Image (cartoon, rainbow, N blue to C red):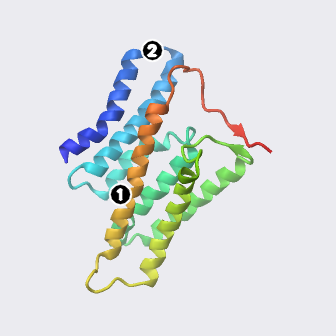
Amino acid sequence: ALVVTFILMLPSCSKAIFVGMQEPYSRLTAQSHFVLLLWATTSCALSFFLASFQVHEKSILLALAPCTLLLWQDPVFVEWFSFVCVWSLWPLLQVDRLQSAYTCMVIIFACLVWIRRVGTGQRHFPTVFSGNMIMSSIPTLSYIGMLGLHLAQVLIPPPTSLPDLYEVLWSVAGCGMFGIAWLVTIAKIYAFSLRNPTASPQVKSKAD
């Protein structure tokens, strides 16, 4: 587990260290370095969560905390990742009898996401979930899968021979989505350009 965790953390850590050593510090590069550090921190926390030994479910909050500060960089990814994180906590929240709190918080957050998207009108924010059909379908398929498992758990009782079926399905599906999130952070780190520190993500208007 230690070796795998180290291997998963190596790409983000090495990139962050090399950029910090090669780029001269200035007021203009500070913002770029800060954004890169947030992506690297999210990636390292995901590496620890995915590969370490006996990680608690709530440890995913270590990855979500720096990721939320990137909302202005990629709101679609941050919103998707937030939903996945809280969804992955469902088995634990069931044990603690927090189903009502979970439902209320998800609904409130979904309303805030809807308000943000309505408020932006026709403006288009750059996101990693764009560019091709496979990437753009990931959030939609994830939401369908998460809702589908919730409905299945309510409507279809697990067989007596597999009493922990849904808990296992939650773990497998969550691991897959967190693996995608880790790949996204690595892609963001290496695609993030520091050659032009004055450039900042621009809000683009959709073509008519």
Query: Who comes first in sequence, dot 1 or dot 2?
Result: 2
Q: Which residue is mark 2?
A: 25
The span from disc 1 to disc 2 (Cα, nearest Å) is: 38 Å
Disc 1: which residue: 175
Please tell me whether mark 1 or mark 2 is closer to you in this view.
1
Question: Callout 1: few (<14), some (14-19), or many (20+) C-alpha neighbours within 10 Å?
Answer: some
User: Quick check: 124 left or right of 147?
Assistant: right
SS category of the residue bearing label 1: helix
For image coordinates 64% across by 42% down, the residue present is 125
Position of residue 86 measured from the top left corner of the image (x, y, whole percent)? 44, 59
Q: Position of residue 88 (x, y in %)?
A: 39, 61
Q: Decide which of 192, 38 is in the foreground and name it.
A: 192
Q: Which mark is residue 1?
A: none
Q: Amino acid at mark 2?
A: Tyr
In screen coordinates, is 108 left or right of 51?
A: right
To which quarter of the image does residue 90 belong?
A: bottom left
Label 2, residues with CA under 10 Å away: few <14, some 14-19, many ≥20: few
The part of the image, by quadrant, that contains residue 196 is: top right
Q: Residue at x 30, y 51 (%)?
A: 50
